[in-house]
Image (tube, grey):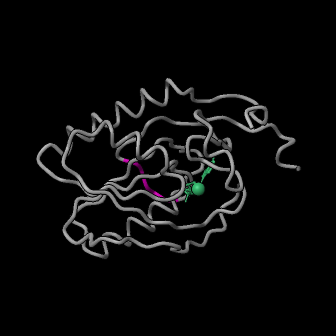
């Protein structure tokens, strides 16, 4: 699997630095509150579990699964494959995803959570790809920016594979033509 990687963009060490900083930022921002972390599966894993270890707050967690991607391209349509199992009414939600790309996924999910009565919805992503944005949305907590390149690892997939890489990398061109 490691042999399929052309270059490493974010090392394991750098990821842990990002996660620790994000945990600290969230802990300070929500000092007097008990946020509900909503992770978007499958990309939020393992980011969300590492992040939570660095959050020193009483909090609850829940997951949702939505899909809009097929291979490396967004299909533009969002479907909810697995919905929340908890009530978000009056909750301070922190929506956690691997990457903010066009912004379609997080704007739509965040709109749905507000519609269900969440008190606040903030976005936390490991990576931000601002060059690809098509909607006016920004994340409140961002690990780091990446250029307009398709990346895999640490939750990010190509056709559901490579999520278990411990770093973020770019695949060799030949992998796409397989
Ligand atoms: P958006 O709706 O376009 O912002 O896309 C967000 C979703 O697309 C993320 O949750 C990822 O699952 C996926 N995605 C976007 N960019 C990449 C990438 O570079 N590698 C892998 N998945 C990506
Ligand atoms: Mg994904």
Relative to 9, is 106 on the left or the right? Answer: left
The quadrant holding residue 167 is top right
Image coordinates for residue 131, horizontal then vertical, percent? 58, 45
The quadrant holding residue 95 is bottom left
Prevailing SS of the magenta stretch: loop
Image coordinates for residue 14, horizontal then vertical, percent? 49, 25
Which residue range is magenta in the image? 135-139
63, above or below 44, in the image: below
Count up the numbered dots. 0
Q: Is residue 162 magenta?
A: no
Image coordinates for residue 70, horizontal then vertical, percent? 70, 63
At horizontal 39% and vertical 48% (from top left) the residue drawn is 124
Kindly give the residue lying farthest to the left in the view shown. Answer: 32
Relative to 87, is 100 on the left or the right? Answer: right
At horizontal 65% and vertical 42% (from top left) the residue drawn is 151
> Which residue is nearer to you in this view: 48 or 73?
48
> Which residue is nearer to you in this view: 97 or 111?
97
Image quadrant for the N terminus? top right
> Which residue is nearer to you in this view: 57 or 98?
57
At horizontal 31% and vertical 36% (from top left) the residue drawn is 54
At horizontal 41% and vertical 52% (from top left) the residue drawn is 96
């Amino acid at each position: 699997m490691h042999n399929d990687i052309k270059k490493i963009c974010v090392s394991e060490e750098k990821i842990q630095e990002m996660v620790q900083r994000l945990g600290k930022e969230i802990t300070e921002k929500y000092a007097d509150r008990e946020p509900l972390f909503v992770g978007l599966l499958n990309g939020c894993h393992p980011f969300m579990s590492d992040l939570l270890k660095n959050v020193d707050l009483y909090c609850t967690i829940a997951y949702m699964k939505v899909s809009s991607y097929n291979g490396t391209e967004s299909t533009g349509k969002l479907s909810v494959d697995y919905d929340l199992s908890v009530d978000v009414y009056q909750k301070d939600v922190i929506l956690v995803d691997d990457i903010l790309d066009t912004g379609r996924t997080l704007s739509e999910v965040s709109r749905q959570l507000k519609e269900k009565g969440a008190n606040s919805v903030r976005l936390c992503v490991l990576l931000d790809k601002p060059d690809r944005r098509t909607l006016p949305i920004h994340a409140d907590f961002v690990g780091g920016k990446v250029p307009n390149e398709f990346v895999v690892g640490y939750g990010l997939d190509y056709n559901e594979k490579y999520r278990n890489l411990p770093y973020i990398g770019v695949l060799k061109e030949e992998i796409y033509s397989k």
